Structures are given as C-alpha cells and as structure tokens.
Amino acid sequence: MVFPTHSPQIFVHEGVRQALERRLLAAFPGPVILSITDNRHSMISHSTDRGILHVRIHHMFLDAPPAVLDTLVLYLTRGDREASVRVGQFIEEASSRIVRPTPRSSLHTKGKVHDLLTIFEDINARYFDSSVTALITWGNHGRRGQRDIHRNRRARSTIKLGSYSAAERLIRVHPSLDRAWVPRYFVAYIVYHEMLHHVLPAARTRADRRVLHPPAFREREQAFRHFERAIDWERQHLGRLLRT
C-alpha cells in the first residue's frame, strides 16, 4: 500500500484563503501574499519586504471565528500586543488541529470483506481528481475493539459509521460495515461522506455556530452516484447495524 508522505500536502479551500487575504489587503497599505501551511512548529510568520506583506499561517485559521480573524489581521498588520495575546490563546485552544502523523502500523484498510484503500482510491479518482490526501482505516480494529462492541451491544441505540479527524487527517470506518451483507456501495458512500469533511470546511452561522454539514456539503453529498440507494439501504438496515 502507498500512503502519503510524512508531511502530506494539505488541501486548502481557496475561497476561504482568498477571503482572509482580502481582509489583510483592506488593513495593509500594500500588496499581501498569504500562504497556508501545515507547519506544526510555527503557527504564524510574517515579514514585510519592499512594501509587500508576506504571511504564512497554519490552516487552523481558515476555520476560525470572524472575531479571531479580525484579531489576527490586527496583529499581522499593526503588531498589536493585545491582539497577539488573543491569537496565542486561540492557537493554544485549537492545538488539537495541529496535524500529528499517524503511525502506518495503526492503519488497517483490508477487512475480511471490504478493502477500504481500494474504495478510497476509486472514490478519490472519480469525485476528487485524486486530490484527497487523507488516510483511512477500519476503526476499533482488533480483538479488544470487537469485545467492546459485543459488550455494549444491548445498550447501543446509535452508531457512528464513519468519522474524520482533521488533527490526524484520518478517516475511520466502523468495523460493523465489514460484513458480507453490507453492500460495497454503502461502504463507499460512508467513505465519500468523510472525504467531503476533508475537502469542505465547516461553515459558521451569524450566531457563530459551527455547522458541519452546510448547504454546499449537502449538495455535493448528493452527487454520489448511489446516494439515494445508500440512504434507503441505511434506513432499512439500521436496526441490524445497531445489533452487530
């Protein structure tokens, strides 16, 4: 299996980057060049050269609340000390989003029935032009995870079939889907859904609430070839998944 390098290229939502660059341009009397990084040691660096403001910031700021972005702009363009403190506080609170490499030994993509890596690569080529650099694995893999599943079987009323961790850039798929009676197209739908979380940033409302599935996400989700079929299958078999 071929995985991304130790420091994989990050996906940058260009519209969000440009919006932040425009904020800087409005506050700085000159050209601005903004770069987004995945640097885990330097969250912000900036300098002025020949009247051009060069800024490099961690991608965590692309999803920051408007108030934080205002403070960031104030710090970068004026060197405001109070703004520097508030930006530092945001970095500390958002430190969980700093990507830490996931050990390859902890990734398990080939199940007894479904091969997640093959599914991931097919979807990546079909829907994302092979641009998604996230990793993927079966969650709760191994005997211990299976014992926990059986131990909690009676009490389970919900099940999270997939998840995406921005901190690890990792998609996890629930092992209950690695069953012969679970169709490949449904596993593919779960993988596609989590890949969208890697590609599309969460939106924020005017009340500064974080929305994981904004309208743009829902619209693109329906572009999945077997979307309606997958939703219908889940509706019919959710009870069986809860008992697995």
Image (cartoon, rainbow, N blue to C red):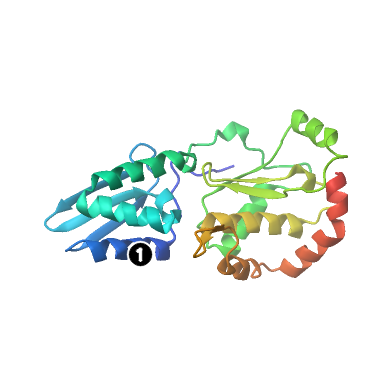
What residue is at 75 percent from the left and 33 percent from the top?
A: 145
Q: Is residue 98 visible?
A: no
Q: Position of residue 40 (x, y in %)?
A: 39, 38
Q: Quadrant of residue 63?
A: bottom left
Crowding at mark 1 (Cα within 10 Å: few <14, some 14-19, many 20+) = few
Of the 4 image quadrants, the one containing the C terminus is top right
Instruction: Give whichever of 42, 116 is nearer the camera.
Output: 42
In the rendered image, the vertical position of residue 159 relative to residue 128, given as above or below: above
Amino acid type, mark 1: Gln
- Residue tagged 1: 18
Q: Nearer the viewer, residue 60 or 26?
A: 26
| Quadrant in the rendering for residue 82 | top left
Q: Is residue 90 at all visible to an observer of this figure?
A: yes
Position of residue 153 relative to residue 204, above or below, is above
Name the residue located 13 percent from the left edge and 58 percent from the top edge: 51
Q: Is residue 173 left or right of residue 95?
A: right
Image coordinates of residue 86 in percent, x first then y, are: 35, 45
Taking the spot 38% from the left edge, 60% from the top edge, the residue there is 17
Q: Is residue 227 left or right of residue 6?
A: right
Q: Position of residue 122 (x, y in %)?
A: 63, 58
